[in-house]
Image (tube, helix red, strand yellow):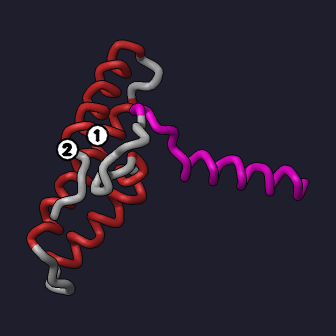
Amino acid sequence: MRLFIISFIIFFSSTSIAQENVCPVSDNESLDKLKESDFSKESLEKTLGDLQKLFDGKIDVADEFIWQSQLIIEGAYYRMEVDKWKDEPTNYKYSVERFCNFMKGRAHYVH
């Protein structure tokens, strides 16, 4: 029984944490390129929490923080769409294309 419980916990923790990349990754990516994992649900929740602290007056940030937050929110939305449509081939293909275009053209650190 213990083995079953431990296996269950490991299985669900690894699937919720690790997302497979859906976009091709090049070996010569620029250093300011964001990773797909930067657009996970956990990353989005952290960004939203930081934004809440900002608007509550608890932290001060540079302007770049706002721009970076917008990218995280947008990318997380596109990544969520990929997961949402995984069982519907036409919509899945479109959502992957949109996310990968975002990753290629806009997913960079703001500086």
Q: Which residue is mark 1?
A: 103
SS for callout 1? helix
Farthest residue to the top: give it: 90
Query: Left or right of 16: which side holds 7?
Result: right
| Marker count (numbered) | 2
- Identified at 28% across, 40% down, the residue is 103
61 relative position to 4: left or right: left
At label 2, the amino acid type is: Arg
User: Does residue 8 show up magenta in the picture?
Assistant: yes
With respect to residue 25, does 62 lie above or below?
below
Where residue 1 sits in the image (x, y, percent)? Answer: 90, 53
Start and end of the magenta stretch?
1-24
Residues packed near mark 1 inside 10 Å, few (<14), some (14 to 19) or many (20 plus): many
Q: Quadrant of the C terminus?
A: bottom left
Q: Is residue 70 left or right of residue 47?
A: left
Q: At x 27% / y 64%, what residue is drawn? A: 48
**SS state under label 2:** loop
Dot label at residue 106:
2
Q: Is residue 69 left or right of residue 9?
A: left
Overall secondary structure of the magenta section: helix
Answer whether labels 2 and 1 touch (C-beta < 8 Å).
yes
Task: Name the spot of residue 105 as percent of width and height, x first.
Answer: 20, 38
Q: Is 111 in front, or is 66?
A: 111
Task: Tell which of 64 and 50 is nearer to you.
Answer: 64
Crowding around mark 2 (Cα neighbors within 10 Å: few <14, some 14 to 19, many 20+) is some
Viewer-proximal residue, 30 or 67?
Answer: 30
Determine the residue positioned at 33% across, 57% down. Answer: 44
